[in-house]
Image (tube, coloured by chain):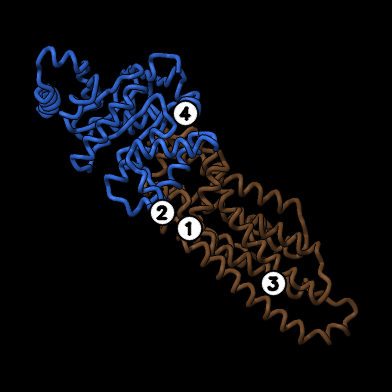
Chain colours: A brown, B blue
Amino acid sequence: MIGTIIRKELKMFFTSPLAWILLTLLQLILTWIFLGRLDGFLEIQSQLLQIANPPGVTEIITLPVFAMAAIVLLMVTPLLSMRLIAEERRYHTLTLLMSAPISITDIVIGKFLGLMVFFSMAIILIVGLSISLLLGGDLDFGLIISNTIGLLLTAASFSAFGLYISSLTAQPAIAAIATLGGLLGLWLVDLVTGENNQWLQAISLLRHFERFNQGLIDTFSIAYFVLFIATFLILTIRHLDGERLRG
Amino acid sequence: MTSATTILAQNVCRNYGSYVAVCNINLELKRGEVLGLLGPNGAGKSTTMRMLTGNLAPSAGSIEVCGIDLLSNPQEAKMHLGFLPEIPPLYQDMTVDEYLVFAARLHRIDTYEIGQKLDGIKQRCGLEDRSRHLIGTLSKGFQQRVGIAQAIIHSPDVIILDEPTVGLDPNQIREIRKLIRELGNSSSVILSTHILSEVESICDRVQIMCKGSVVFDQAITELKQQETNLEMIFTQLTQGLIKRDED
């Protein structure tokens, strides 16, 4: 049953031009950064050879691309997540799902996974971009894998948050703005915290992504992401169920 | 498929905060029976229907569909239900075929059966030459038909239609009534309407609701035998109640 929802969500994504435009823009921005870093690398390559333990291609070119990708995904998520539930409510199609023999949990998980399939496609494109560097040299695959995992978990957290906000309203635009606000807030927490503020650092999404970005697969960060995703999915399910109970 | 009683609601109540929308509704429907639900605006017809289809949880009381408790076993019970809400739950940017396939999957129809069911249902609802049209471009009448098709595609035992003939032209109304009559032979149908003649022509039984409770419940044949006028009863009962309240 989850499969039915995922399929429908993907169909809805790709029949609208929005998904295609977003994928194109995402790829355009990241390729731009990628090429910029590649240029920079070629310029300083001779100087790098003189250092005893020089940073590799992966560190100089790929890491900034992934770091930027996280920010771009932050901007893109609200546009995709806004309509997930808010639009169903607006056009009264939520009734169709609620009267069908499918549980609210399946609906929410299906919608979440549908969005994740879309994000996985975007992330595959980014990984493909990095792997194209193999044409000119060696890559640190460990670093690329940790970055990919980090980006997937970050995208999943954004999606879960966006899905929850979308379940609160019947207006997709409001859901988008609120999601963007919330995610920007989480990002800012990361920017304003000093090194000594442990508590704020611990709740910053991008601080956790940074660990993955540096090649560090930290169980604390994984636990944080998983808890973040689970919390918002459960909140969404509870909210939809509460609507049935309270009206 | 075995039990003769398809839907049984006992002492169902629903409050919105301190406002009592529906109070102590009792409803029993046998296979092959068409029940007309009448009542002035705000009488609680839609609330009752939403409760019977699991879209809204009752504040008190029990609902059984084909002997399965709707509240404790919602998914199994909903397999026997088909629901057309007041506003048809349509995805504007899907084609008629895509939409009906999605509805069929939601109702757990096996993949190899879907094609056959789809053809059958389109023929029944007069949608054959609209298969590849986007739902958003269809006229109100055709959208209504798609809504009905969605509710009956899985041949449910109980079909609940909230004002199915609203916005249709006289020819379409006649066709839809014929369809409802046909459906009434194999399943139980509950329909709400404001058109009294509609009830007299297609229903076996009529219930009049006012201020959240059932004030009148009689078989149409009995009514005809007594040669009483439904309109008179309706006006007396509902206006009397409202007047008394105002005094």
Residue A200 placement, left or right of B119:
right
The residue wearing badge 4 is B79
**What's the amino acid at mark 4?**
Met
* Label 3 to label 1: alpha-carbon separation: 32 Å
Q: Quadrant of residue A36?
A: bottom right
The residue wearing badge 2 is B93
Residue B198 versus residue B94 in the image, above or below: above
**What's the amino acid at mark 1?**
Thr
The percent position of residue A122, horizontal first and vertical second, equals 62, 62
Res. A64 mark: 3
Whether residue B241 can be seen here: no
The residue wearing badge 1 is A15
Asked if marks 2 and 1 fall on the same chain, the answer is no
Callout 2 touching callout 4 (CB < 8 Å): no
The chain to which mark 3 is attached is: A
| Residue at x 44%, y 55% (from the top left corner) | A175
The percent position of residue B247, horizontal first and vertical second, equals 9, 27
Which of label 3 and label 1 is nearer to you? 1
* Label 2 to label 3: alpha-carbon separation: 39 Å
Q: Label 3, secondary structure: give it.
A: helix
The chain to which mark 2 is attached is: B
